[in-house]
């Protein structure tokens, strides 16, 4: 069964901004789908379209088989949502938030275990949310999303505001929820986190899906290279590094030799080769990262801007 | 059911807001001050009672809209600005449930604030004027509550069609000035301007009552003031400059004004709801 399906989904804001551009997306039931893209790529707009917060200019979407614009209530009944950049009610306590969401979903809830599930202490239950830290708010929001045992979890940038430990815990919770057969739609601009959690990834760029597949698929689709940086005491003359199988290129700069490899196993041969000729001081090895994959897919032609450059650009600030 | 979950949660949230208590306590305070003024003027018995109740109407006319607007103008726009509306709409409720639930909740808060004032008024009436005209008192209470809720409805409508706090505030202030502050002085009211254009400039000779009717339909404060004429016995309204019911055309009778006022309870909210249903919340 298909959990989320969009066809030709398009959203324009005004005449100039195309936030989502003819998106065809398919998320299968039971999978953890990573929705990856730089800020401003249109991720939040897609989520807003799925939840009927905004209406499509063209195209359509179904969530759990229900039409997003005409059957929004059925979708909300079966979906837990962690929206991005939304505040909770600062005058209400954690317990009151959970009880309200439970009542709205027509279920009963025991707030304390629900809070403990997301790493919040029982004392937090009776404190007003206005006094919570960003990380605590985000945990409470996840607990609220889990109320009523939803079939689908839609998490929009869930790790924002969390420290590294919090992010790891968050991922563990998401993985546990996915093991229960739940579908998880996980949007993020953090590659490592998506790679760690998701079965399949879709990369969104300027409102269109530029790639989908498992992390391994996406890697294989490109001739991605790893790098090896070797700091040496003296740079040996005439090292035939580029003749080693799997080595693409070797460059030397100030006592550091940088070697690009297509095949990771070539790294040890490079090291052996260098070790025979000089003293190796330090070795830094990097795998072909999703970061590079991400850049490759999202860079447009010769204009290889990093995602950070795009943050201040008003014409593409359509997130939220 | 869904309306109730929205209203219950909103009521819980709003009643913890300081601003709600601040404006909510004003009505009782003002009632106390105006009753005291009548008392200090040395009016007693029937005449004191009527003067006090008449004061209550005027306190109502000017301050009740302010209380109602302040208590409700951020109900939806505030949530849109903070983004919490996404949490609200992630639960299985419709946008209609949100607007109506908010209306119910804020109407309840405003009504509770007014009822405190009425209770105080009732106590002071019995203590100071030793007579309690139940029908007049009940009439004023009923009309003032409907009037307040009409303004709550307008505030909810403004809140539903605006996406930010500042715009909602501008809308609420604008409506308050246009329908209330400006009508206190007939020389600057929109209605006086309309009459001037129709009768003086265009020479259409539209009757005063017809102008009054336009005033009632476009302005809940005028509808409220006309409606209250029907509550007081003629022996009392004779002493004022106000026309008696017998002098007025059928379509500006107090009963018609009550119906117009009830229309104000519904029409703005329906308009706001229709716009809100189509709005992009992002």
Image: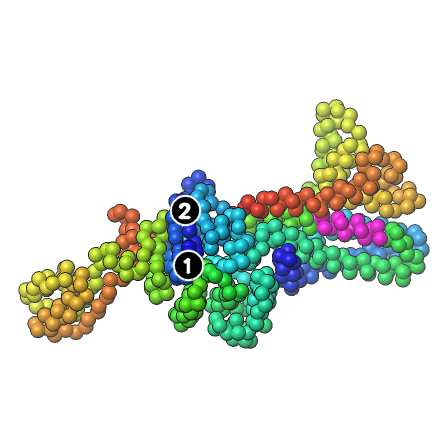
Which element is circle 1 on?
Answer: loop
Near-viewer residue (B67 or A179): A179
Q: Is residue A171 left or right of residue A96?
A: left
Q: Is residue A273 left or right of residue B110?
A: left
Residue A281 vertical placement versus A301 (above, below): below
Q: Which residues are magenta?
A: B138-151
Residue B9 appears at what percent x and percent y? 62, 61
Give the residue at x 47% y 52%.
A65
Near-viewer residue (A32 or B149): A32
The numbered mark, 2 or 1, whose residue comes first in the sequence reads: 2
Give the residue at x 90% y 56%.
B132
Res A48 seen here: no
Give the residue at x 25% y 47%.
A302
Which element is circle 2 on?
Answer: strand
Q: Is residue A274 left or right of residue B88?
A: left
Q: Is residue B141 found inside the magenta-colored segment of the image?
A: yes
Chain identifier of the residue bearing label 1 in the image: A
Q: Is residue A13 left or right of residue A303?
A: right
Q: Which residue is mark 2?
A: A7
């Amino acid at each position: 069964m298909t959990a989320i399906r969009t066809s030709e989904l398009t959203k324009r804001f005004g005449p100039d901004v195309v936030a989502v551009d003819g998106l065809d997306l398919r998320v299968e039931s039971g999978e953890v789908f990573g929705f990856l893209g730089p800020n401003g790529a249109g991720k939040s707009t897609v989520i807003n379209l799925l939840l009927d917060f905004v209406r499509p200019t063209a195209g359509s979407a179904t969530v759990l088989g229900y039409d997003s614009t005409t059957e929004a209530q059925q979708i909300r009944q079966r979906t837990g949502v962690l929206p991005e950049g939304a505040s909770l009610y600062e005058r209400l306590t954690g317990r009151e938030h959970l009880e309200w969401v439970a009542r709205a979903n027509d279920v009963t809830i025991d707030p304390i275990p629900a809070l403990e599930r997301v790493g919040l202490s029982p004392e937090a239950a009776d404190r007003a949310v206005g006094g919570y830290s960003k990380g605590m708010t985000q945990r409470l929001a996840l607990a609220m999303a889990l109320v009523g045992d939803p079939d689908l979890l839609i998490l929009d940038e869930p790790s924002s505001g969390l420290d590294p430990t919090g992010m790891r815990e968050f991922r563990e919770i998401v993985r546990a929820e996915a093991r229960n057969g739940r579908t998880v739609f996980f949007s993020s601009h953090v590659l490592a986190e998506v790679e760690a959690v998701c079965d399949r990834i879709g990369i969104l760029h300027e409102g269109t899906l530029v790639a989908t597949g498992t992390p391994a698929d996406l890697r294989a689709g490109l001739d991605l290279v790893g790098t090896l940086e070797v700091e040496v005491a003296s740079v040996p003359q005439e090292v035939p590094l580029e003749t080693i199988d799997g080595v693409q290129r070797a460059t030397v700069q100030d006592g550091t030799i940088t070697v690009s490899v297509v095949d990771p196993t070539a790294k040890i041969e490079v090291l052996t080769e260098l070790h025979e000729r000089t003293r190796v001081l330090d070795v830094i090895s990097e795998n072909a990262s999703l970061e590079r994959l991400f850049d490759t897919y999202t860079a447009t032609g010769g204009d290889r801007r990093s995602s950070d450059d795009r943050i201040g650009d008003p014409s593409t600030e359509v997130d939220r | 059911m869904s309306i109730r979950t929205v209203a219950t949660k909103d009521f819980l949230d709003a009643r913890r807001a300081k601003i709600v208590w601040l404006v909510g306590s004003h009505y009782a305070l003002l009632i106390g001050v105006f009753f005291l003024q009548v008392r200090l003027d040395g009016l007693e018995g029937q005449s004191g009672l009527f003067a006090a109740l008449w004061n209550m109407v005027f306190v109502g006319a000017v301050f009740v809209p302010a209380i109602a607007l302040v208590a409700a103008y951020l109900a939806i726009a505030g949530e849109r600005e903070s983004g919490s509306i996404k949490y609200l709409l992630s639960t299985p409720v419709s946008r209609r449930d949100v607007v109506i639930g908010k209306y119910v909740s804020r109407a309840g808060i405003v009504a509770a604030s007014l009822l405190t004032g009425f209770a105080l008024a009732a106590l002071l009436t019995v203590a100071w004027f030793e007579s309690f005209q139940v029908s007049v008192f009940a009439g004023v209470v009923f009309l003032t509550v409907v009037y307040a809720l009409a303004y709550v409805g307008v505030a909810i409508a403004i809140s539903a069609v605006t996406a930010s706090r500042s715009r909602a505030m501008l809308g609420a202030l604008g409506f308050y000035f246009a329908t209330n502050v400006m009508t206190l002085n007939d020389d600057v009211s929109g209605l006086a301007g309309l009459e001037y254009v129709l009768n003086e400039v265009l020479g259409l000779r539209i009757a005063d009552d017809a102008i009054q009717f336009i005033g009632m339909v476009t302005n809940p404060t005028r509808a409220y003031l006309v409606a209250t004429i029907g509550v007081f016995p003629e022996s009392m309204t004779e002493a004022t400059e106000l026309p008696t019911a017998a002098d007025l055309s059928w379509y500006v009778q107090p009963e018609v004004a009550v119906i117009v006022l009830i229309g104000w309870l519904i029409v703005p909210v329906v308009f706001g709801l229709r716009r809100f249903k189509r709005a992009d919340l992002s």
